[in-house]
Amino acid sequence: MGTAFAKRTLTILQTSDLHGSIYPISYATNEPKDVGFAKIATLIKAQREEADQLLVIDNGDLIQGTPLAYHHARLHPTDFNPMILCLNELAYDAAIIGNHEFNYGLPFLYKAIGESRFPWLCANLTNEDGEPFFGQPYLVKTYESGLTVGVLGLTTPYIPNWEQPENIAGIRFLDPVETARKWVRILREEEKVDLVIVSYHGGLERDPETGKATEALTKENQGYELCSEVPGIDVLLTGHQHRMLVSTINGVCVVQPGNEGRALGKVELSLQQCATGWEVLACEAQLLSVEGVEADTSILEMASPYEERTQGWLDQPIGRFSGDMRITEPMAVRLKDHAFIEFINRVQMDISGAPISSTALFDNTSAGFLEDVTMRDIVSNYMYPNTLVVIRVKGKDIRAALEQGAEYFALDETGEIVVSPAFLLPKPQHYNYDMWEGIEYQINVAKPIGARVVTLTQNGVPLDMEAEYDVVMNNYRAGGGGNYTMFQNKPVVKEIAIDVSELLATYILEKKVVEATVNGNWEVVKGQGAVKRGRSSLGKPR
């Protein structure tokens, strides 16, 4: 270490996976909720007043996720993007491309980038010539003290497994670890920065303490690799997994602030000037919760025109249900055929013409449908901008998918069926357990993993493992998302490029009254049992 001249601090503030959340409410009920950028803004403003030197970064998945963001993208896309408006107001230094940035197409993303007063960074998404697709791989910021900080942007390369091909046309998805080796070296050796901050829209596939794998090593979440295999990184900002995480890996300070603006990530670096620049004396990371924080009124006022239009749209009545489609116990919905799940599957089958369908109950906040249905009910139960794909698979692929879904369950010490920890940690993955219509099946959780599907028929006839069947599912699953690799690269019979939430709304509008039905074609048990045979008009194998 050279001769000490001065000591300073650098404060890094990070948001990630805001998913269009501005107002501190639940759109399903309009009840207050400790989320949203308006609360985050209060924290950022307070930190800005206290900080010696400040860097503010958004780590991706910014412009999609709430009814407000959906309403803007689908009904008023030419208006200024509300999330960009918020980040501009708080003088962000940079943002990172997240996987959900592509959901509404490249033109919509380009427009958001063009409205930003800050650069969007991404080094590992390139064009065919190997140049960063979005132009700027990193940011170098120089402070009055002479401190220079390099911020490198990286994005999970797993996006082609989920996204519509036309939304990512012309983009090559390179390995973040290999990319980081190149650009960290450039930042250190050519740009001569004092500090390297990597902001990576991805998470950790390994336990930060032990290094043991916590999920399938698909290269979706390579944060641990970045810390352990790429020298020269001082801080790693992560996201994508919606975790609340503070850790240190191989001397690298790591933080992840959850989702929807539940917390603000804060990293404070104590620095000492020396003859060769600035060196890190200490690094401390923490999460600043928004619980109990007052929302910033200027942000609320700025977003109010968007919010008012969204609320009016959400409360538009679109039809009625005859029968009970309410969800009171999410686990019960996942253990036995339920009217809500059957409805989603029936709509998918009706619209696509496919004889078999699968869907999920995305989270435990879905309330199902009351008798009178509004757009609020639709978007609060089906919150993702998924589209539908009909793929041609073999019977053995369907069985493999059912076995994959059956891993969602475990038996506790009393023998009761519970959710497997693998689907709860490091983040809940309820959306990766599918329920099917058009076939009859039974899952026995008492059986070993991989052998839990004990009954699998169609119209009472055992499914032919080598025969071909057309199945409709959302585009995320059809691409193999959620470890459903058996669906990857299957022949595509039909694509329906309209959001499922819009398809559901249109279906209800046209029918005016929809009858809730349950044919009992599947169940999950923990011992011996029998499953009813569905009597719907189903297609035959090809």
Image (tube, rainbow, N blue to C red):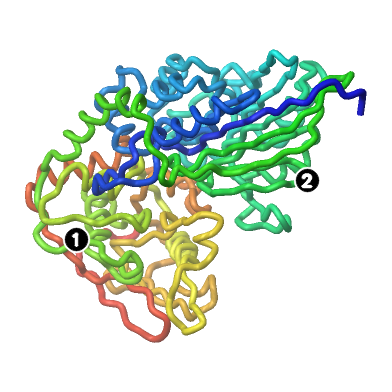
Which mark, by number, is residue 250?
Answer: 2
Q: Which amino acid lies under the numbered mark 1 shown in the image of this protein?
A: Met
Q: State which quadrant residue 335 falls in.
A: bottom left
Is 88 situated left or right of 325 in this image?
Answer: right
Q: Position of residue 88 (x, y in %)?
A: 45, 19
Q: Position of residue 460 (x, y in %)?
A: 29, 74
- Please state, as top left, top right, bottom left or bottom right, where the N terminus lies in the image: top right
Residue 301 coordinates in the image, percent (x, y):
30, 25
The image quarter in which residue 501 lies: top left
The circle drawn on residue 485 is none
Q: Would you name the residue on which mark 1 appears?
A: 325
Numbered circles on residues, count: 2
Q: For residue 230, say whether it is visible.
A: yes
Q: Position of residue 203 (x, y in %)?
A: 60, 44
Q: Secondary structure at mark 2?
A: loop
| Mark 2 surroundings within 10 Å by alpha-carbon count, few (fewer than 14), some (14 through 19), many (20 or more) | some
Badge 1: residue crowd in 10 Å (few <14, some 14–19, many ≥20) = many
Task: Kindly identify the residue that appears in the image at 36 percent across and 50 percent down.
Answer: 473
Q: Along the horizontal axis of the image, is 245 left or right of 261?
A: right
Secondary structure under tag 1 reads strand
**Residue found 40% across the figure and 57% down from its top:** 468
Answer whether residue 171 is visible to the viewer in this image. no
